[in-house]
Image (cartoon, coloured by chain):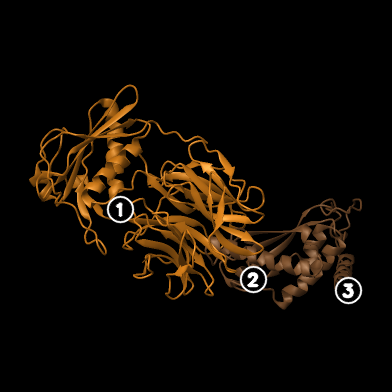
Amino acid sequence: MRLIWCGLLTLCVWLNTAVAQNAPLRIKITQGVIEPLKFAVPAFEAENLGAKKIAAEISRVVAADLTSSGLFREIPSSRFIAQRKTFEEPVRFPDWRAVNAQALVTAAVTTNGSGKLTVKFRIFDIFSGVQLGQGMQLSGSTQAVRRMAHKVSDQVYERIIGEGPYFDSRIVFVSESGPKDKRLKRLAIMDFDGENMQFLTGNDNIVLAPRISSDGKKVLYTSWETGFPQIYLLDVETGRRKRVNTPGDGVAFSPRFAPDNKRIVFSYERRGNIDIYLMELSSLRSARLTSSPFIDTAPSFSPDGRQIVFESDRSGNQQLYILPVTGGTPKRISFGKGRYGTPVWSPRGDLIAFTKQSNGRFGIGVMRIDGTKERLLSASFLDEGPTWSPNGRVIMFSRQTRGPSGAPSIYSVDITGRNLRPLSLRAPASDPSWGPVLP
Amino acid sequence: MRSIYLHVAILFILVACSDSEGGFGSGSLGTDGYQGRGFGQNDITSSTFFKENVGDHVLFKVDEYTLNEVAKTALDIQANWLIENPGFVIIVEGHADERGTREYNLALGFRRAQSVQEYLVARGVSGLRLKTRSYGKERPVEICSVERCYSKNRRAVTILASGSS
């Protein structure tokens, strides 16, 4: 069950050549992206024979990463005019302009006998004819080629888009198998693009709604391991798990970490009433945050840790409420037609993502924290359970198809509502929880 | 209420006697529900009998957890049998159909289970024997995505958790 991370990637700025200071290539994203930025990634140069395969793989992964964001469009190599031989040779800007490339990524890959992998890369703004930022060098292990590629993609994304990256991140989710009435569910973790999947638990119990900590090291989830739902805390690296002792004789479920990862919030059922509690993991000291005779569930922290957003049916059906963790009266923020559930606060702090039910359909939407500017990003037979990318730019969620063979899969969508796409996974999957960009 | 239960039992015996395949296998008379297997259903104190003849579940309307008259009648019969057979520990399991979010449906399942538990206690079943749990929408009995199936999945099931105590 042990997950292996072969050495941390090291990143350093490299080459002090003349660079554009105010990156003119940056595209500003407001409501809906205009046209994806066209980029070219010629096959990365292998500086030694052993690096050839790896260089080719890294360049393909970088191109796929950027394309998957919906903000970039790759120019196929068949259209290239310039044939690059070495990393150091100057860029022939007119050749790239002729194929309408706006950005060019060049790189050189080196491996050595002890399994060290080094990638040097540069980003060019073709129209301005300048290098964008400084050249970079990344070092890591030949066992972590895809991670290396995601790190390169992150740098390219960050420099061009001007927002935090998300490619070198992982997602905890529930991998499902078996028929609908006897479904087996196991926790699993994968890279943001669905690759490198590993199971975190066996498949002898139902497990639900894993939530990864902000450092990516721990996972909270609900399991029926004892026959009754209970909260568990799992260490991602060792695979060890332990039950979280919650207060009294009630049943706790729907847990989520505070941004400090020291406290958790969860729903707590006692005699059919469901309220929200806050608990410190080290001392197990808990505080009741809501006390209504209604269903209060699915709590999620604000990024500053001061407030929670949750759903409650106190108004007659599911709606969203915000409450300071110091207590008080919850403030309702959702007022549109339909029901609102599973709210999740954006890492930027400005938006709440949620599941909306209306007219017999389920969709993922976002609204500002004051409830204004509601927008629906998806709708289907059953979409639910949003999770935010580390940069607050992309949302993943589960989509279940209807009927006896209905099964869930994981989709992602840009917060503009564009670029809705399924992750390509080998088995049904649900309940994604997106972890941080890895160090 | 006892008469209702006896009525059910008698009905069953009549059905069993008319069973052309016999159905009376060999086996000793077990008082334990699980040992009664094979010789089966005519042990009126078995959990199998409870499940198949007394009835182990009640159904709910969309997004509701209150008991309707049909459910109450069914629970009256359940309660009488459970009082007659005090050896069983009881888990009331609440379920929801797939038309809801995961957490909410889990909560709804708890409420349905709680409604049944409270009713059974009010009918004289000892609260000490009863526990509730919810599976939310995770364990449907019917797998189609239309109301015909949903209506059967919105349920609370009375599970006889362990054999005779």
State which mark lies toward you, 1 or 2: 2
As drawn, the label of residue A69 is 1
Q: Please tell me which residue lies in front, B50 or A422.
A: B50
Viewed as shown, does residue A321 lie left or right of A350? right
User: Which image quadrant for residue A345?
Assistant: bottom left
Amino acid type indicated by mark 1: Ser
Query: Callout 3: few (<14), some (14-19), or many (20+) C-alpha neighbours within 10 Å?
Result: few
Tally of numbered discs: 3
Confirm or deny contact between disc 3 and disc 2 (CB under 8 A): no
Q: Residue furthest left?
A: A94
**Chain B shade in the render:** brown
The chain carrying label 3 is B
State which mark lies toward you, 3 or 2: 2
Confirm or deny contact between disc 1 and disc 2 (CB under 8 A): no
Q: Is residue B151 above or below residue A6?
A: below
User: Which image quadrant for residue B84?
Assistant: bottom right
Q: Residue at x 82, y 61 (%)?
A: B49
Query: Callout 1: few (<14), some (14-19), or many (20+) C-alpha neighbours within 10 Å?
Result: many
Q: Is residue B160 above or below residue A197?
A: below
Q: Position of residue A425 (x, y in %)?
A: 44, 49
Q: Position of residue A208 (x, y in %)?
A: 55, 53
Query: Callout 2: few (<14), some (14-19), or many (20+) C-alpha neighbours within 10 Å?
Result: many
Amino acid type indicated by mark 3: Ser
Q: CA distance from mark 1 to mark 2?
A: 44 Å
Earlier sequence position, callout 3 versus callout 2:
3
Q: Residue at x 34, y 70 (%)?
A: A373
Element under disc 3: helix
Element under disc 1: loop
Q: Is residue A186 above or below residue B64?
A: above
Q: CA distance from mark 3 to mark 1?
A: 69 Å
Viewed as shown, does residue A34 lie left or right of B86? left
As drawn, the label of residue B65 is 2
